[in-house]
Amino acid sequence: MDVRDHRLVPEHRKMSEEEVEELLQKHDIEKENLPRIKSNDSALKQKDFEVGDVFEITRSSPTAGETTYYRRVVE
């Protein structure tokens, strides 16, 4: 079974460099301050990415609705 197809695995979308810069400026942080996701994470399988890329993760919650998280890919 492909774990990415499971209903509990949220959508992972690679952000463009422009989007990442906007995110970092908005929150006044450095890229290294973002939470990390391992490059071998099952949710990233068959996605085109490099170490250092940033993913936007959209999760559904029955209480909070839709929430967005950001993760920086590490080795």
Image: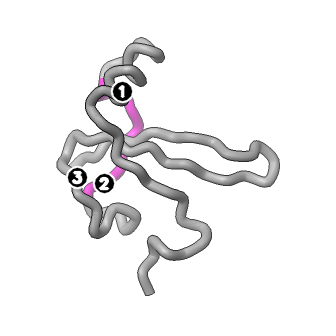
Residue beneath disc 1: 33
Q: Does 42 appear above or below 62?
A: below
Q: CA distance from mark 3 to mark 1?
A: 19 Å
The stretch in magenta equals 31-39
| Sooner in the amino-acid sequence: mark 3 or mark 2 | 2
Please name the residue shown 38% across and 32% down the image: 34
Residue beneath disc 2: 38
Q: CA distance from mark 3 to mark 2?
A: 12 Å
Residue beneath disc 3: 49
The three-letter amino acid code for the residue at tag 3 is Phe
| Sooner in the amino-acid sequence: mark 3 or mark 1 | 1
Dot in front, 3 or 1 = 3
Please name the residue shown 45% across and 76% down the image: 3
Q: Which mark is residue 13?
A: none
Q: Is residue 45 left or right of residue 75?
A: right
Which secondary structure, mark 1? helix
> Could you say where residue 1 lies in the image, as x and y percent from the top left?
44, 87
Please name the residue shown 49% across and 48% down the image: 57
Q: Does 2 appear above or below 39?
A: below
Dot in front, 3 or 2 = 3
